[in-house]
Image: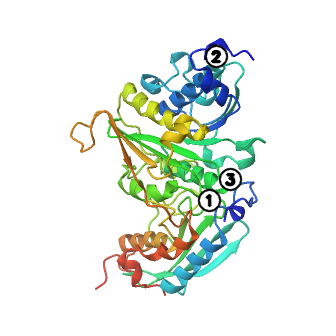
Amino acid sequence: MTIDPVFARNPREAERLKEKHILIVGLGSGGSALALMAARAGVGRFTLIDPDELALENIGRHMLSREFVGQPKVKALKRAIKAVNPQAEVRAIAKDFRAVRPAETFNGTKPDLLIGATDSFGCESMLNALSLAEEIPAIYAGCWGEASVGEILYVIPGKTPCFECFARFRKDTAPLPADDPRKYTDPDYDGTRVPAQAGLWPNLLVICGIAFQLILGLLDPEGDRGQSLIDCEHTLWLANVSAYDSPLQPLAVTFARVEKGCAVCDESKLAELGKELPEELSTPTST
Amino acid sequence: MASTRRLLGEEGKYMTLSKARWEAECKLMAGLFPDFKPYVEESLVGFRGHLQGPRSGRPYSVVLRAATTEYPLLVPTVFIHPRPEPQYHEADGQLSFLLKWNPARGSFARTLLVAFRYLQEFDRSEEGGESK
């Protein structure tokens, strides 16, 4: 069987990935990079979900360039993926993931991996729910501190902690906007979106490059990467790119464990719901 | 557990609220706020009750509402009637607030804190000042 010359430098990966289907939520700087890494590695099927159009301020750290400004990111990315691999099947859904129905998401074929590259905690929670319900592995990649530190979490439903097991920490520390007048006027306003921060594209690409190794491992669990990287114990990877005052070693990955089990993925934990209620709620004054 | 979540709601979305979670929420509310009663209306669930204005002493009707296709992933909405002030309400009348929300720790009881704090801030006595 002949292989497309585009994949002449990675024929082994291309052969194993050509039938794989990935779903990416969020096609910003991280999601667009991961999508094109996947296309060049040989992934054959894509579902891309993002409601936004490409803006000029995206260009400094996005795989797309000025010619696509004003177009939905997912449609422009579809063209970019097809330009790499015309055989790839790409579904582009220009919607907020919170409004997408499961049937629309799958269109008959269940993805092999869900990728969360969004700045919205609400969308990540929805993606986690989809991952748990359909028992599809998921990976969440993001960065903090002007892209000086990357954070990558993978989830294998039933075997590892879920996104919410970890996000109990992240959501308490994220810099969400205190107030935004759009929430009074825009019914689709998402108050769980973390505002865009400064940060260099190369920093993001370092983090995406590391995340992509995990993506390859999750897509091919029997392969070398799957066997070496996916241990279901160290599911949180922290990559220090340029936070030189951080205790994490620069230009290195630190592996961390997340405690497994929360009220979302483990019903035995539901009794803990009331444990952390503020004191004022323990002295009810309802009439 | 997974099979429960695969049930589709009216909009063709997942029923993200499991029966066990709803029962846990009802138990928590019954323990803390026995006067707030649970309700289920088509694809919406929540609690209704009254809170007393800390200064005016007047009863405020409070409704907590969530879609079974979104809860506990997204924070419930809160409605308060009458409105002690006109500003902090969205077009559909829901209270506009920001609550750092975690589906694994958040609850309807926790959301009621928003109504508490709102009334602490905006409830006024009939004379307009703070009552002693």
> Label 3: few (<14), some or many (≥20) within 10 Å?
some
Q: Which mark is residue A83?
A: 2
> Label 1: few (<14), some or many (≥20) within 10 Å?
many
Give residue A51's quadrant in the image: top right
Q: Is residue A34 above or below residue B55?
A: above
Dot 3 falls on a residue whose secondary structure is: helix
Looking at the image, residue A237 sits to the left or right of residue A106; the answer is: left
According to the picture, the residue beneath numbered tag 1 turns out to be: B70
Q: Quadrant of the N terminus of chain A?
A: top right
Q: Is residue A258 above or below residue A89?
A: below
The amino acid sitting under disc 1 is Glu
Q: Residue furthest right?
A: A108
According to the picture, the residue beneath numbered tag 3 turns out to be: A134
Looking at the image, which is closer to me, A26 or B111?
Answer: A26
- The chain that hosts pointer 1 is B
Looking at the image, residue A83 sits to the left or right of residue A261; the answer is: right
> Label 2: few (<14), some or many (≥20) within 10 Å?
few
Indicate which label's residue lies in the foreground, 3 or 1: 3
Question: Could one spot residue A21 in this view of the protein?
Answer: yes
Estimate the x, y position of residue A89 in percent, counting from the top left: 72, 28
Dot 1 falls on a residue whose secondary structure is: loop
Tell me, yes or no, whether the two marked residues, 2 and 3, touch with CB atoms within 8 Å. no
Task: Using the rendered image, report if marks 1 and 2 lie on a common chain.
Answer: no
The amino acid sitting under disc 3 is Glu
Estimate the x, y position of residue A213 in percent, counting from the top left: 49, 34
Give residue A199's quadrant in the image: top left
Mark 3–mark 1 distance (CA, rounded to whole Å): 16 Å
Q: Is residue B67 above or below residue A183?
A: below
Looking at the image, residue A93 sits to the left or right of residue B50; the answer is: right
Q: Residue at x 56, y 16 (%)?
A: A9
